[in-house]
Amino acid sequence: MRVAAAVKTTLVLALVIHLHHRFHGPSLDYWGLAVASAASWVGIPGPGEPVLIATAVIAARHRLDLTGVLVVAWFAATIGGIGGWLLGLRLGRAVVTAPGPLRGTRLRAVERGDQVFKRVAVVAVLLTPSWVAGIHNVRPIVYLPTNTFGAAIWAVGIGGAAYVIGPSVIDVANDLGWVTVGALAALAVAVVVEEVLRRRRKHARERL
């Protein structure tokens, strides 16, 4: 039942995209974006946002179609989210509750998660990785539309912001030189690290 609902959702979205949009630019760029977006929404950290930002900036340079970038990111993220959810449904709970180290802690975490997903399922789906929703048995009628909406917000929010802001950031970097930008970034990181260490030393002295 859940797999059938997921397949139907995927087919409907694919049909809508096929009927209503034509893509401009190299297909390889769109495929790379699709793979990265899907991977991120399955639950693999890292690839989705940087690739979405990069392709949106390329679209701002008129080498790709912005609508195409956003549609591909949204569709692939939706599919990835469905995949992660199904994975959590089939395997996640058994893995998390399996015998082994810290099993009691893991069981309590699952129990608390169940309570959260019962009270605020939509919010929990939007704020946690897709496989977590699967572990807590979120129903298709709740998960599928929420996942689709969350993927749209992710694609439009990050992609749209990169389209508007990205080119100006790149222009500034080109003017200053990437070495200068890197040095400034490293300096900022160093300041943050120093502040964190200072506060830790202060707390340590207060305990003494």
Image: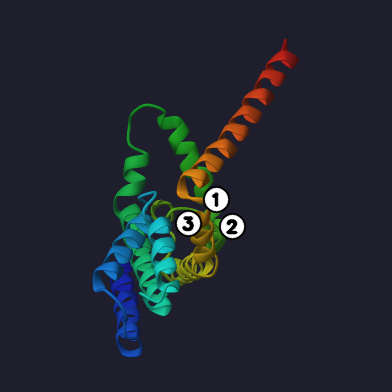
Q: How is the image coloured?
A: rainbow
Q: Is residue 29 left or right of residue 151?
A: left
Amino acid identity at mark 3: Asn
Q: Residue furthest left?
A: 28
Instruction: Tell me if mark 1 has few (under 14), some (14-19) or many (20+) residues whose alpha carbon lies within 10 angstroms of its own.
Output: few
- Read off the residue under disc 2: 119
**Helix, strand or loop under label 1:** helix
**Residue 107 at x, y = what percent?**
44, 37
The residue at 72%/10% (across/down) is 208
Amino acid identity at mark 2: Arg
Q: Are marks 2 and 3 in contact (CB under 8 Å)?
A: no
Q: Is residue 5 visible?
A: yes
Q: Is residue 119 above or below residue 72?
A: above
Amino acid identity at mark 1: Gln
**Residue 75 at x, y = what percent?**
36, 72
Question: Alpha carbon of mark 1 to alpha carbon of mark 3: how far?
Answer: 51 Å
- Read off the residue under disc 1: 115
Q: Earlier in the sequence, mark 2 or mark 3?
A: 2
Question: Alpha carbon of mark 1 to alpha carbon of mark 2: how far?
Answer: 6 Å
Q: Earlier in the sequence, mark 1 or mark 3?
A: 1
The residue at 54%/64% (across/down) is 168
